[in-house]
Amino acid sequence: MSVGLSIVICTHNGKNRLPIVFDYINNLHTPLQVNWEVLIVDNASTDGTSSWINEIKLSKKINFTLFNVDERKPGLNYARITGAKNANYEWLLFCDDDNLLDCNFIKFWYDFLLNYNNLGALGGKGIPLTEQPRPDWFIEYSHSFAVGPQYSKSGFISKGSALYGAGLFVLKTPILQIVDKGFNMIMSDRESGKLTSGGDLEWCYLLQLSGLQLYYDDRLIFQHKLNDSRLTWDYYKKLKAGIASGVGLLEPYHYIFKNDYKNSFSFLIYYLKNLLKSILVYAAVSLKAKLSSKYINDLGLIILKSKAESYCVNLSRAYNHYKQLKRTFGATV
């Protein structure tokens, strides 16, 4: 079976990170039946990334087809959509500019395609690669860095679950068909200087709402380079706050997976209940922290605060997005 794959690398100021990524791509064991390319999406870089890519294309340092496009609007999700629109092949592989793919990464994906149908996305396992010894807390919280097993074993994942975007194979046409209808994704995802996230979850949710399945395969291994600045507790707290900041925006998807497409008023009541609950829980834990000298879980407080703020500021956006989902997937508003 002949199939095509576009490795999409979205980068912001990644000129110094990309050379080793290319070295690993050079060493991929790619089946002869796979036509493939590498597409760099320069997401508002200011370090000359695009110029450097143009120089690399003229050199003999790479043995793969390479081209690049610009996406000036900051945000990883915007860059991924641009990548999907410009990719020449049906399947995409989202490889971050700090992901080093195992040599069998594409081979295992191709083997999987030969045996399964109705697949929308396929994800694997990131292995942390650090220069300095990892802090004691890292193992417990490593999943937030897109490393470690995503599930206890390989297999199809349940509807409403998701895969992280690093090292993620996705089928592009279902997403582009939705976008071409005028659908606007609600998550912008990572931007320069901001640790917001959730765009990968939205891709997974939309594929599932389109009737496709997601699979986790622990043979798909990549190394995830984590520089020293990301291995501090302060950075991790900001990262978790950024992740939690998207909870209100993603509630339309959570509601649909739990309740199907009910009327918009039912969603509004559901959202308001979660909003009130998030405020009360944060207030209770915050009060406990003030009254008890033994309470030191600042991470928990940061996450609860970020969730409560997300619910408060995103009510209108979430409500309108729920109505958009109903219109897009054929349900009556």
Image (cartoon, helix red, strand yellow):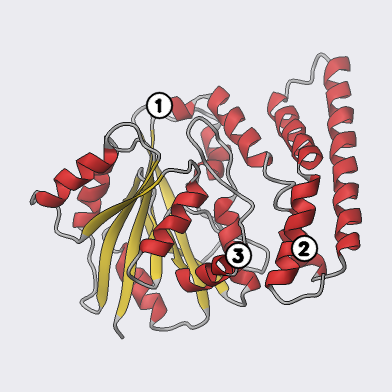
x 48%, y 73%: residue = 173
Most foreground residue, 271 or 121: 271
Name the side, left or right, on which 176 lies relative to 94: right
Considering every residue shown, the one lying at the far top of the view is 293
Tag 1 residue: 228
Which callout, 2 or 1, points to the residue nearer the camera? 2
Relative to 85, say whether 77 is above or below.
above
- Point out the image quarter for the C terminus: bottom right
Separation of residues labelled 3 and 1 (CA atoms)? 41 Å
Residue 147 in percent (x, y) is at 47, 47
Residue 60 in percent (x, y) is at 8, 51
Report the amino acid beneath label 3. Gly
The reply to whether residue 280 is in sight is yes
Name the side, left or right, on which 284 lies relative to 97: right
**Residue 285's quadrant in the figure?**
top right
x 28%, y 52%: residue = 68
Most foreground residue, 314 or 271: 314
Upstream in sequence: badge 3 or badge 1: 3
Question: Tag 3's secondary structure?
Answer: loop
Tag 3 residue: 182
